[in-house]
Image (cartoon, rainbow, N blue to C red):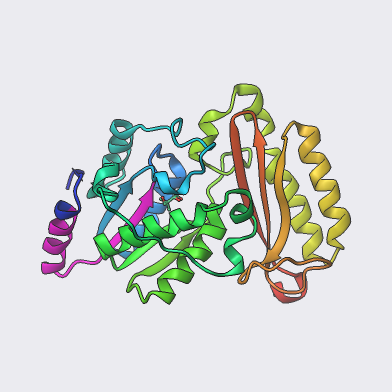
Amino acid sequence: MSLTTVHTVADLRATVAAWRAEGLRVALVPTMGALHNGHISLTKLAREHADRVIVSIFVNPTQFGPTEDFGAYPRTLPDDQKRLDAGGVELCFAPSVDEMYPDGFATNVSVDDAMTTVLCGAARPGHFDGVAQIVTKLLLQALPDCAIFGQKDYQQLMVIRRFSKDLNIPVEIIGAKILREEDGLAMSSRNRYLSPEERAIAPTLNRVLAEITTKASSGAELGPLLAKGRQDILTAGFNPIDYLEVRDAQTLEQVDETVTKPARIFVAAHLGKARLIDNHAITPIDIAG
Ligand code: PAF
């Protein structure tokens, strides 16, 4: 079956209804386009869970701050469609801003939990309200059996799990592991902003996270590890660093001294025009088994 693209909620729903009538399972992979192999790995995971895969492509204005890259965000629909077709995806949902936010649209979705005020929530005020708003709409429009989100945006995944549970949205939320380039750089649409020189520096983030993860999982004190990590990131050429922090893997509460429960180290830092984020799981050695 080759790729079909629809631009309206009505056409999306009609397609899903026809699949449902055949008893098929449906997965949704929400994206903002500029697709790379990381996204394609999400569609492969989706295929393991469903008979039909939908990829939505929508650069959502409400999750960008006024000085952020909404205008510059790469929009590459024809290339994206080719990639999805080659990857065996059945449906691309590519709505316009007017289709998603028609005149008079007035509803917000906000997760009132400390997890939305730290990390990217602190650095990008309002970002997670915009994400919650658009993902709620996409889930209710498509009503898939499951939806796949990458763990590179781990905080986003936790926020989505929270509002889906709180709002009883009947969709299984599945997290997918981070896909990396050969040199360890986490795949991201924003890697396109990097000059060749910056691209050579960018894997520093993964290296620093890996070093801290190894030491922290054996019980090393976090203070000196994070101080050295920050210095290494700045020395490589990133500036500023929005955060380099270790947090509880479930609650996202800060871990201050040593890691004794499953945790995650998170980084966001600017390199030229790009703001890059990454994270690693830290499992304390005594519970790793
Ligand atoms: O992760 C993204 O690409 C976006 O935040 C998402 C989930 C598609 C919502 O716009």
Front-most of residues 174 and 160: 160
Residue 265, image x and y in percent? 69, 57
Residue 116, image x and y in percent? 57, 62
Part of the protein shown in magenta = 12-31
- Asked whether residue 133 appears in the rendered view, the answer is yes
Residue 194, image x and y in percent? 58, 28
Relative to 182, residue 19 above or below:
below
Residue 26 belongs to the span the image colors magenta: yes
Please tell me how many numbered marks the rendered image carries. 0
Q: Is residue 205 left or right of residue 104?
A: right
Residue 56 belongs to the span the image colors magenta: no
Give the quadrant of residue 281: bottom right
Q: Is residue 28 left or right of residue 7?
A: right
Relative to 259, residue 96 above or below:
above
Front-most of residues 287 and 124: 124
- Asked whether residue 282 appears in the rendered view, the answer is no
- Residue drawn at x 84%, y 67% as measured from the top left: 257
Residue 61, image x and y in percent? 40, 44
- Residue drawn at x 72%, y 76% as measured from the top left: 287
- Residue drawn at x 35%, y 60% as measured from the top left: 107
Quarter in which the C terminus is drawn? bottom right
Q: Is residue 188 left or right of residue 91?
A: right
Give the quadrant of residue 276: top right
Q: Residue furthest top?
A: 196
Front-most of residues 86 and 208: 208
- Residue drawn at x 63%, y 54% as measured from the top left: 122
